[in-house]
Amino acid sequence: MTGDRARRRPRLPLRPPAWTATLRWKAAVFIAGMCCALAALLGVLVHVAVTNQTVGQARDRALSRLDDATEQYEAGGRLGPGAGIDPPDLPRRLRELAVGGERGTMVGDHDRTPTVWAAGPADGGRAIAVQVDYAQGARTIDGLDRAILGSSVLAIGATLLVGSFAVTRVTRRLHLTARVARRISAGDLDARVNDPRTRDPDRHQDEVATVSGALDTMASSLQGKLLSEQRFTADVAHELRTPLTGLHAAAELLPPGRPTELVRDRVAALRTLTEDLLEISRLDARNERVDLDAVRLVPLAERVVRVSGAAVDLVVVRDLVVDTDGRRLERVLGNLVANALKHGAPPVVLTVDGPVITVRDHGPGFPDYLVEHGPQRFRTEGTSKGHGLGLTIALGQAQVVGAVLTFTNAADGPGAVATLILPDGETAHGGDPGEGHS
């Protein structure tokens, strides 16, 4: 062939529907399988027992009539109805058995009617045989089989209904426990399962109640530890403010010189750290109130660039007016720009594209732990300066205003990218697409 061979797309493996992975479905399949197996076993046992009894009774009647017919034949009398010498419908195997000098019985058909044959030897190498109508016994067995099948279907259906109801109660409790666990992981430490089975210590608990109780206990313990940490952070920050204020005033009285500059710089750093700790404690307490107002994004971004006091490029793709807390939004963008200037490398670009605002630098990028798990307070990589609180505050303030803040590394080169997605608002015409400022 001169042309390229067409590539066959690999067939994706067939995956069962998602509902087949549920505990309810698995329990229903297990219960149905066990019921079917048990019904089949009991049905076979009953069928075999009744069939053996019915056929055995018919064979006894046939042998009794064969004895009577043999006596009549030997006495030279008439054989009677249903008896004869070498009847044409006699099964071949039974005929051979009788000609061979033995007696036997066999279930067969005569004129399409279930019949039990009994045969024995007669003189001259012939067979004397009698037949007993077995239609009533066959109908009895057929009726029994239908009754077994119907009762098995009803029993399986009833068992499935009862089993599904019982499993549904368990799965409903499991779903409730899972929802509470997700709420706790999302930060709602007041969420509890409150399973009534865990309230009574004298009541026996099942596995679901044990898991629910353990989850509630874990949440209470976690909440207590976090509240203690928050109170400790707030108390420390409050206690530091007074001596730091006096230290700042004393530093202002020192004579000019390099040592004075170092002291003032460290005092300013301590004051910033204290204020950040207070802000984090307020965010952790989750009692912040949002002052909503119509905020135009480009003027706010220009103010952030101007306050940063450094060369930051502002790129406007699309301006927008959103209902948000302008002070908090400015705090978020200010922290992102400050982090890019401190830990990244120029150029630092602040881009406004409608409700999506990005801050990118061209430095080494965010650490892997930060991209994967988000910012962690008091954790920095390498020789980076700072306390790791700026991005933590930015993330907390973004959550307060209902925005989504993500941290990634640039795919088209070096640099860190912080993306803030605001709740969309009313579009305004504050700038042309692609307009840039620096």
Image (tube, grey):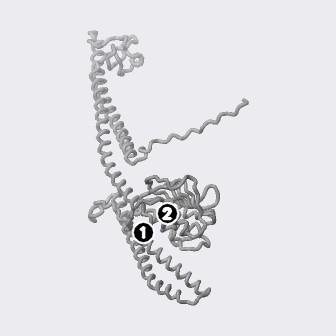
**Does the rendering let one see residue 295?**
yes
Q: Is residue 15 left or right of residue 409?
A: left
Question: Which residue bears the numbered disc 1?
Answer: 283
Q: Is residue 377 left or right of residue 164?
A: right
**Does the rendering let one see residue 185?**
no
Q: Quadrant of the N terminus?
A: top right
Dot 2 alpha-carbon crowd within 10 angstroms: few under 14, some 14 to 19, many 20 or more: some
Label 2 and label 1: CA atoms lie apart by: 23 Å
Q: Quadrant of the C terminus?
A: bottom right
**In-front residue for pair 405/60:** 405
CB atoms at circles 2 and 1 under 8 Å apart? Answer: no
Q: Is residue 206 left or right of residue 410?
A: left
Q: Residue at x 41, y 16 (%)?
A: 92
Question: Which residue bears the numbered disc 2?
Answer: 300
Whichever of labels 2 and 1 marks the residue nearer the N terminus, that label is 1
Q: Which amino acid type is shown beneath numbered disc 1?
A: Leu
Q: Residue at x 42, y 18 (%)?
A: 93
The x, y position of residue 265, in whole percent, is 56, 81
The picture quadrant where one finds residue 210 is bottom left
Dot 1 alpha-carbon crowd within 10 angstroms: few under 14, some 14 to 19, many 20 or more: some
Q: Is residue 38 left or right of residue 369?
A: left
The x, y position of residue 199, in whole percent, is 28, 64
The x, y position of residue 350, in whole percent, is 56, 61
The picture quadrant where one finds residue 150 is top left
**In-front residue for pair 433/26:** 433
- Nearer to us: label 2 or label 1: 2
- Helix, strand or loop at mark 1: helix
What mark, if any, has residue 329 been given in the picture?
none
